[in-house]
Amino acid sequence: MRWPETARGSCLSPLLWLLGCASALGAAQQFVYKKQYAMGTVYEIAAYDPSPDRASKAIEAAFRRIIELDHVMSNFDESSDLSRLNRSAHFHAEAVPRDLYRAIQDSLVYSRLSEGKFDISVAPLVDAWKAAQARGKPPSASLIEKLRRCVGYQQIELIPPNRIEFHSPCLRIDLGAIGKGYAVDRAAEALRSYGLRNALINAGGSTVYAMGTPPGQPGWLVHLRDPSRRLDPTVLLRDDSVSTSEQSRSSLIDPEGFGHIINPFTDRPVNATLAVSVVAQTAVATDGLSTTLFLLGPQEGGRLVRRLPDVAALWVSPAGKSNLVSTGPQIMMHHSAIHSLW
């Protein structure tokens, strides 16, 4: 996913956008751009506002919110609230912060929609395959069989207003498939609390949320991931979000390759090189749905999209074939034809 394009030309990075487009801003709206490393990626926020000082303070507040959430939801920080939950919630209801409760609650929505293919309880399998990648050989069948009993979103019980219990002795949660989207939505709330109305939040290129519009533009034009480099799909965002899921592959594990998205039905990484981009009204929805639809594939995923209001999804293969399904938002294809994957 690339940054927006103005009428004067493509802005391939925030810095080029700042240098190439500053002359077109006008006196009423000032441009402010900042970036911050968090959650294993670089978050970038660009904003237009009459007061650059207010915009700067708002962006700093948004970054503080993201960093706060990193400490809540990190699997790598042993002192995080999620790590504490993963250690202590087995057959015991554990009180958690409101943000962790909400993020897990949101995640279970996509588990139910996908009938379990999206499952935040795959942390034991994720860790096993990460270790396998480091060793250069897949996990043993006996280990996978053992870990399979640890996985199942149905074993996560939410007890309102703020307690969670695992009905499994070894279940652990990984929020990597939805945590960035949740953080982006909370960052947008922080910007709005300072009165900002026109801003773009970019979470490492995988999730983008747009507030309002740039000066004189109908929306924020965002280029989507295109593994084929042929189609150049774009979407015009205005108070909505887009996320992309795609699988990275490695020859270290087996000839089919290894990726980071685990299918809980097969206990293995998904063997696919598609990119799936989803447009919806919130970043948590696009983050959760992009992983869900990647796991479901174009046929089953397309049927799911048709059941959801105001959602668009685009699957793109390295060969330049694509499937586009939408119940409202428009994804524009800059190609003479759209070829179905199936």
Image (cartoon, rainbow, N blue to C red):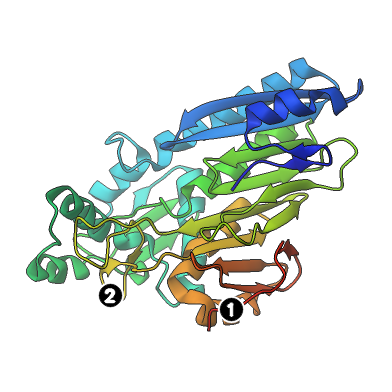
- Which numbered disc, 2 or 1, marks the residue that appears first in the sequence? 2
Q: Which residue is mark 2?
A: 266
Q: Position of residue 198 (x, y in %)?
A: 79, 36
Q: What residue is shown at x 47% (from left), y 66% (from top)? A: 274
Q: What residue is shown at x 62% (from left), y 54% (from top)? A: 224
Instruction: Bin the neighbour count of mark 2 within 10 Å (Cα to Cα): few under 14, some 14-19, many 20 and up.
Output: few
For residue 307, say whether it is visible: yes
Is 119 or 50 nearer to us in this picture? 50
Q: Position of residue 44 (x, y in %)?
A: 59, 32
For badge 2, the amino acid type reads Thr
Instruction: Bin the neighbour count of mark 1 within 10 Å (Cα to Cα): few under 14, some 14-19, many 20 and up.
Output: many
Label ID, residue 302: 1
Q: Quadrant of residue 55?
A: top right
Q: Position of residue 148 (x, y in %)?
A: 21, 70
For residue 91, say whether it is visible: no
Element at label 2 = loop
